[in-house]
Image (cartoon, rainbow, N blue to C red):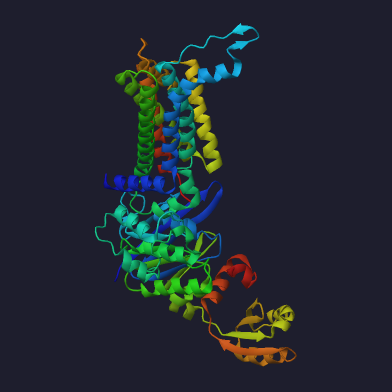
Amino acid sequence: MTGTAIEIRSLTKRFGNFTALKGFDLTVPRGAIFGFLGPNGAGKTTTLRIMTGLARATSGDVVIEGVRVGSGQRPPIGYLPDTPSFYNWMTAPEFLRYIADLHGLADPPIAALLERVGLGDTGKRKIGGYSRGMKQRLGLAQALLPRPAVLLLDEPASALDPAGRKEVLDIMSDLRGELTIFFSTHILNDAERICDAVGILHEGELLLQARRDELLARFAQPIFEIDVAPDDAPGLAALAEQVRAQPWAERVYQDGARLRVSVRDVPAARQALLPMLADRAVHRVEMVGATLEDVFLRLTNNKTGATSAAERVA
Amino acid sequence: MRVFLVQMRKELREQWRTRKMLIVVVVLVAFGLMSPVFAKITPDLLKSLGESQVGGVQIIIPEPTTRDANDQFVKNTTQFGLLLAVLVGFGAIVGERERGQLALIFPHPLPRRTFVLAKFAALAILFGAALLLGAAADYLYTVLLFDAPPAGGFLAMVALLYVWLLSLLALTLLASTLGRNMTAAGGIAFGLVLLASLAGMITRLAPGALTEWGRALANGGDTPARWGALAVTLAITGLAVAASVLILERQEIE
């Protein structure tokens, strides 16, 4: 699988005076699992709605597998909205049969597809009685049914519990190599787990686009991770302030009872940091590599100024 | 055409599974059955209530005839047909948009034009079938209780009532496309239908003139044809459906 699956050129979307997308370019190679990252309100869903033809761009183009969206010809896509809403009076096989009929598929692999997404035993149960996770998996099945070349997923796992999230991510991961997957998420661990490449969108601007490994290597920076006892977590803010004032500290994030300190000068940090922890109930101190979350926070904080990790990522 | 048939089949199945079909058929058949019965018993009811005499004035109640049964049928069908058309139709498009179902199905090869036309066709089939059954029930009871109305005139009345109902369905569908939510769509639907009904008081070209024309034909009377009203009603229907298509094609789906 070589070549370009998705090409976005100068994509702009305005709602009155508000510019949701500020004319960005993006290219997704064929066969990639591409994570479209950004905090809530960054413009991810707007981009996906334009890619699917549900909304129109103010200017710019989206070309999917050589077909320009809005040209009258339908690109070979499958789409799963963030909270798929079905006809509750149908059963899963009936809904997939309906979608297959819209596509004119003579012998659609409905049973096999339901089996693949873990809905093989739902029988005559109406979709109205499905859990959120089941609906999400059925949403994946309807998107996959016409065997699209490009699968577009809007926050496919964000609203699910950990078990549901794992199931959906596993299905996506299993699809690697079969088609191109473009999915938006604000949960960076999900992206880190399955993506080959990512693009980071922030306030309608694409901050960067790169292969995940290249990105982590480019922004690689030693990080000290410090876990303290939960009782000591309230005092961690003061420590964070103390560390932030050090010349060797690049960036400090607190997440509950964990402090992550990215450093410029490892020996200096090692020498100074450990004494600072002397009177704390420390569970663990470890030097780790940068994660996608660190890269994301570094890039987005550079754009808007530092905010807490919880604010930026949640 | 294939996608249109797929979509229309889905719409008809939805009407069946969500009991809309049952409700419309039962209501129109029930009023079809009751119209001649009401016509028959109304004079007896009045007699029993007032002994045909109020304050020394004797009220003469003529014997009911086929004409009364036809009048009752037109009155009931227009009142309840209007109500059903609005109640069944106003959520047809806005409901799916509000629930997010359109965001799921429009990325599939389902043109918005086909979606609207299939919705209208399915509603037209439902109300057509229910009206036919209601008219058959009315005809049967009218024959049993009175003289048979002229078959040709009666059929013409049913056809004219159907054309009138189609215009209401088209206006309701337009309201469903225009409304940003169910409440707004319901308000617009009642507003448009009310406007169409009020127009009947001002001009003989309004859709309401068709029901009067139909009643006169069923009663076998000599009445002027209302071809102008028929043309206007068909035009309203066509324009309302076309407007729904154009509006939905321009809308951005959440």
Q: Foreground residue, A228 or B35?
A: B35
Q: Quadrant of residue A61?
A: bottom left
Q: Foreground residue, A10 or B91?
A: B91
Does A266 sit above or below residue B158? below
Q: Residue at x 45, y 30 (%)?
A: B31
Image label count:
0
Report x, y in % for residue A170.
Answer: 42, 75
Report x, y in % for residue A209.
Answer: 45, 69
Which image quadrant: the N terminus of chain A? bottom left
Left-right relation of A195 to B180: left
Left-right relation of B98 to A77: right
Q: Residue at x 41, y 37 (%)?
A: B25
Report x, y in % for residue B125.
Answer: 35, 37
Q: Is residue B234 visible?
A: no
Q: Foreground residue, B110 or A71?
A: B110
Q: Quadrant of residue B65?
A: top left
Does A170 sit above or below residue A101? below
Residue farthest left in this picture:
A106
Does A117 sit above or below residue B73? below
Which image quadrant: the C terminus of chain A? bottom right
Report x, y in % for residue A230.
Answer: 69, 82
Q: Is residue B121 visible?
A: yes
